[in-house]
Amino acid sequence: MNWAFGVICIALIVILAQLMMIYNKRSDELLARQEPLRRRIQSHLKEIAYSVERVQRATESGLEEMGFSISELVEKNAQFKKGVEQLELQVQSQNKGEEEDDIEDQDPVSLAAIKEDDPRLVLRDGIRRREEVEININALKRDVEAIKCNMLQVNAKLKRNERKSDKK
């Protein structure tokens, strides 16, 4: 009976030794496969970092151009606003002695004839266009802020990923 127990123990030890050799062989294979993958991952990280830098440079130059465009629009809008205010004063001074007749109440044929020369229509159109320009300027400013926010988020994620890859 003892000899059977001894044979079983030796067989189990042999099986355990074989399993350990198989696991050791597998781990060596995995380690050998892991190194090329790590190198590939590192090269992809470098390519991503380079691409992000290019995007940042392009975004910064675009933001500068948008900043110049916005400042030009603001200046031209201020000039336009002054012109509209002057036209408004002119229309008010012309209409002081005249009775206020509503332009929208007239028929389309007479409205077309009046449209070319009537300063009230020019004023109304100028005010509407100035408001559109102000809306567009505000939209551009919001877009610039959104782009800056997105670039900050991209930078933060990139730095976080660089720290993670440096730890490994």
Image (cartoon, grey):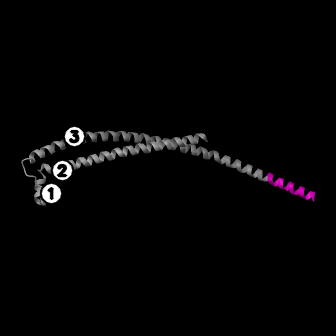
Q: Amino acid at mark 3?
A: Gln
Q: What residue sits right under mark 1 in the picture? A: 104
Which element is circle 2 on?
helix
Give the x, y percent position of residue 96.
9, 47
What SS does tag 3 mark?
helix
User: Few, some or many C-alpha atoms within 10 Å of disc 3 (few <14, some 14-19, many ≥20)?
Assistant: few
Say which residue label 2 marks.
Answer: 124
* Residue at position x 80%, y 53% in the image: 16
Towards the viewer: 73 or 95: 95
Where residue 19 sits in the image (x, y, percent)?
77, 53
Displayed quadrant of residue 144:
top left
Most common secondary structure along the magenta stretch: helix
Q: Are marks 1 and 2 in contact (CB under 8 Å)?
A: no
Residue under label 3: 79
Dot 1 or dot 2: first in sequence order is 1
Quadrant of residue 113 within the rendered picture: bottom left
Residue 51 inside the magenta-drawn segment:
no
Question: Disc 3 and disc 2: Cα gap in Å?
Answer: 17 Å
Tell me the amino acid under the disc marked 2: Arg
Q: Are marks 3 and 2 in contact (CB under 8 Å)?
A: no
Look at the numbered disc 1 and give the secondary structure of its residue.
loop
Residue 106: image location, x then y, percent: 12, 59
Residues packed near mark 1 inside 10 Å, few (<14), some (14 to 19) or many (20 plus): few
**Amino acid identity at mark 1:** Glu
Residue at 12% x, 50% y: name it: 118
Q: Which residues are magenta?
A: 1-17
